[in-house]
Image (cartoon, rainbow, N blue to C red):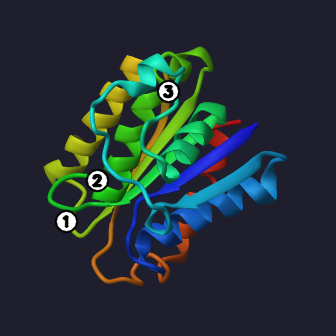
Amino acid sequence: MKVLLLNGSPRVGGNTDTALNAIQEGFLQNTDAQVEMINLRECEIVGCKGCDYCKTTNGTCATKDDGQVVADKVVEADVVIFGSPVYWWGISSQLKTAIDRVYMKGALLVQKPKKIGVLAVGSATLDDPEYEIIGKQFKCISEYLRWDLIVEKYISATEKSDLAKDSEKVSQLKELYKKFV
């Protein structure tokens, strides 16, 4: 099983990093899965230009940047976990840009079944509509691509180190691998 974690946080060492690191640790310690995390803040990915060049080249983008690499890894993965802080009631621009560029893979995205998870960390309480908005976006993506949305995990954390101080939540995140195996 290939597991890909896409970290959409531009911040190093914040709550999204803590959450995804815990999930990654759970997979690595308890499964024989190949696990890779891509920190999108370290990637050079420009937005999709909508040129449809990819439709004439079997999923190769006209733009030569890390977007092609990320899209290829999404296609290859069995499990994809999308992680992001909440910015203005949605996912970060880093994660949204990467998702938009995966478009280049077209039909290849539905050929291999995927289990996906979404993790969003915001400072609002969990009853805030921002989490529902993000969840609906990933439900639509999943339905369109015929992917199986397994986990929606939302965390309320205000300060950069709030999640790291909550050992119970970190332990719960380490156990999420069970939902994918």
The CA span between labels 3 and 2 is 21 Å
Q: Is residue 10 left or right of residue 128?
A: right
- In the rendered structure, find residue 105 and report the number of the disc placed on it: 3
Indicate which disc, 3 or 1, sits on the residue closer to the N terminus: 3
Q: Residues within 10 Å of mark 2 (few under 14, many from 20)?
A: many
* Residue matched to label 1: 124
Q: Is residue 125 above or below residue 107?
A: below
Looking at the image, which is closer to me, 137 or 44?
44
Indicate which label's residue lies in the foreground, 3 or 2. Answer: 3
- In the rendered structure, find residue 91 and report the number of the disc placed on it: 2
Which quadrant holds the C terminus? Answer: top right
**Does residue 115 appear in the picture of this structure?**
yes
Do labels 3 and 1 touch, CB within 8 Å?
no
Q: Position of residue 73 (x, y in %)?
A: 62, 41
Looking at the image, which is closer to me, 53 or 70?
53
Indicate which disc, 2 or 1, sits on the residue closer to the N terminus: 2
Label 2 residue SS? loop
The CA span between labels 3 and 1 is 35 Å
Which quadrant holds the N terminus? Answer: top right
Looking at the image, which is closer to me, 6 or 143?
6
Q: Indicate the quadrant where residue 170 lies.
A: bottom right
Q: Is residue 144 left or right of residue 134?
A: right
Q: Residues within 10 Å of mark 1 (few under 14, many from 20)?
A: some
Indicate which disc, 3 or 2, sits on the residue closer to the N terminus: 2
- Residue drawn at x 52%, y 36% is 116
Indicate which label's residue lies in the foreground, 2 or 1. Answer: 2
The CA span between labels 2 and 1 is 14 Å
- Residue drawn at x 37%, y 58% is 84
Q: Is residue 156 above or below residue 176?
A: below
Do labels 3 and 2 touch, CB within 8 Å?
no
Indicate which label's residue lies in the foreground, 3 or 1. Answer: 3
Label 1 residue SS? loop
